[in-house]
Amino acid sequence: MKTNETFEALPENPVVARLRGSGGSLVAPSACLAVVLAFVGLFGACGIAFGDEVSDAQDALSEAESQLTELQAERDELEASIASLQDEIDSVAAQAMAAQLASQQSLDRLKNSAVFHYKLGGVTLYDMVLSSESLADMLATVNYLDALEASFAKDAQEQQDLTAALESTIKGLDQKKAEQNALRDELAAKEAEAQTLVEEATARVDEAKEQERLAALAALAAPSGSVFETGAIDGSWQLGFASAYSFEDNDGWDATASGIPLDWTSYTVAVPISQRYLLGSSVEISYGGMSLVATVTDVGGFAGYGRALDLAPGVWRAFGASSPGDWGVRQVAYRFL
């Protein structure tokens, strides 16, 4: 190596040049340290702020989890109460249908009684007495008519009692349904509150590591029961047009979609084919100031004609119609129980 060679001056390090400053001498170490500490302080403040943000988000998740757990307990209790009331409603609906049948049978007996026909069929009691051929016949006729009157009075009183019992049963049914609907509304409010909690927690948490907790929150907020499932019965009153049918215009004579035969005392209805899931359900129908309960046992293709129900003989007869043609198509109020 040659020691007497001249070396060109190397360019100065830019950092050193900046530290040297305009005076040509290096900046004091204390100033350099101050710059470094300033940068450290800035990054430290950002880190603390970020840490506070994460802590707040985690606190929000914990709070939401706690509130949702409490809400879930309340929702479970409400759903259990709704289900219990549904059992009571089903029981009362069955009682109502039994009372309806007894009332209809009593009314039929009343209509078929001799006194009913004598009074309304053109033959008067006076005519019967005058047609007697002797005093003995007349006394026998009077005694017979007295017995008929007593029987008629008894049947009439029985009919009144059965009608009153039916009205009381329907009233009790309406009260239970109103109570259940109030619980449904309360449950719907709880469901909405749960969803709001999840949305608020989601808005505050953006970290991937918290997505698992968010998913658990969403699952906790989701409805757990069958109250709001598709096809569930909400029990609200609706207005709709109802037609009527009997053996003559029923496909298969007395056959129904449920397999329960159609007959003249059937307190049953058909619903549109799209509502087949309602087979076996009870429906309360109100018309002309009278309410009764029927069972959905059949389906039909009448929705396209703007009809909601097709009434079986027991129903349209109870509403005072003498035939499907006499009933025609009328607007009724109804709700599924």
Image (spheres, rainbow, N blue to C red):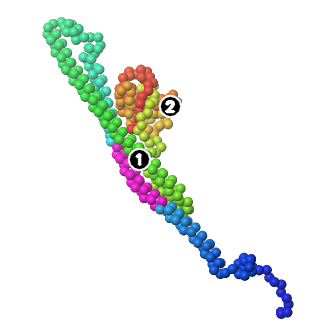
User: Would you name the residue on which mark 2 appears?
Assistant: 303
Determine crowd level at label 1: few under 14, some 14-19, many 20+ residues with C-alpha closer than 10 A: many
User: Could you tell me residue 231's position as x and y percent?
Assistant: 46, 41
At x 41% / y 34%, what residue is drawn? 237
Vertical position of residue 131 compared to residue 56: above or below: above
Q: Amino acid at mark 2?
A: Ala
Q: Is residue 92 above or below residue 310?
A: below
Q: Cα distance, mark 2 to mark 1?
A: 32 Å
Is 132 magenta? The answer is no
- Reading the chain from its start, which is encountered first: label 2 or label 1? 1
Q: Can I make out residue 262 in this image? A: no
Which residue corresponds to mark 1? 187
* Front residue (pair 50, 330): 50
Residue 326: x, y in percent? Answer: 41, 20
What secondary structure is the magenta-colored segment mainly? helix
Determine crowd level at label 2: few under 14, some 14-19, many 20+ residues with C-alpha closer than 10 A.
some
Residue segment shown in magenta: 60-86
Question: Type of residue at label 1?
Answer: Leu
Decide whether residue 63 is among the magenta residues: yes
